Image (cartoon, grey):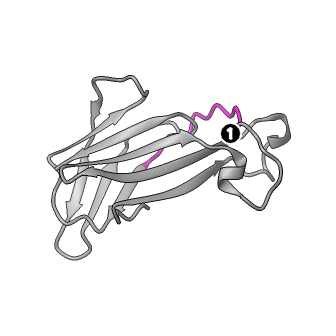
Amino acid sequence: MLSPLLSSSFALSSPSSKLFDFKSGKYAYRRINYEQVNEDNHEINSIRAEYNDLNSTQENTTNGGNFEAENKIERIVLMGIEKKPASITLFTSSNDKVGTSLEFDVDLTTINTIIIKRPGCHIANDWRVSIQF
């Protein structure tokens, strides 16, 4: 979950080092960012992260891994949104000009939540979600 306080960020690591062969580079580190670009446009993006970006206590620097995951993000939950978006669009590469329109549910009555349903983006790939108000 990301909370839209103008901007926020978190890290995603996949898969677990106890279950898979991370020593041979079969892993993915991602940085997921939420940013309010302007009053009418918010963006969520997933980019490859360096190991030291995610765990600054470690001395080892890696290149974000080469884990090719079939896993897709099931949903994105945004809390604290005060108005209903006009549209939400997924872009699967940085040079996409046309994206895929996404389905979403909105609950502005109690917890101000938007749930983006089945965005279909792979966990180990770069992607961007644009939210237009």
- Asked if 8 appears above or below 93 in the picture, the reply is below
Judge from the rendering whether residue 92 lies leftward or rightward of residue 29; answer left or right: left
Secondary structure, mark 1, is loop
Q: How many marks?
A: 1
- Asked if 101 appears above or below 31 in the picture, the reply is above
Q: Nearer the viewer, residue 68 or 81?
A: 81
Across and down, in percent, residue 133 comes to 16, 50
Figure quadrant of residue 61? top right
- Please give the name of the residue rendered at 82% of the width and 40% of the height, measured from the top-left corner: 21
Figure quadrant of residue 57? bottom right
Judge from the rendering whether residue 49 lies leftward or rightward of residue 119; answer left or right: right
Across and down, in percent, residue 22 comes to 80, 42
Figure quadrant of residue 107? bottom left
Across and down, in percent, residue 92 comes to 42, 30
Q: Is residue 55 visible?
A: yes
Magenta stretch contains residue 109: no
- Please give the name of the residue rendered at 24% of the width and 69% of the height, measured from the top-left corner: 112
Judge from the rendering whether residue 23 lies leftward or rightward of residue 52; answer left or right: right
At label 1, the amino acid type is: Gly
Q: Which residues are magenta?
A: 65-74
**Residue extending furthest toward the bottom:** 110
Q: Main secondary structure of the magenta part?
A: loop
**Quarter of the image that includes the N terminus:** bottom left
Q: Is residue 120 visible?
A: no
Across and down, in percent, residue 101 comes to 25, 35
Graded by Cα atoms within 10 Å as few (under 14), some (14 to 19) or many (20 or more), the crowding at tag 1 reads: many
Q: Which residue is mark 1?
A: 64
- Please give the name of the residue rendered at 16% of the width and 57% of the height, measured from the top-left corner: 84
- Please give the name of the residue rendered at 78% of the width and 35% of the height, measured from the top-left corner: 25
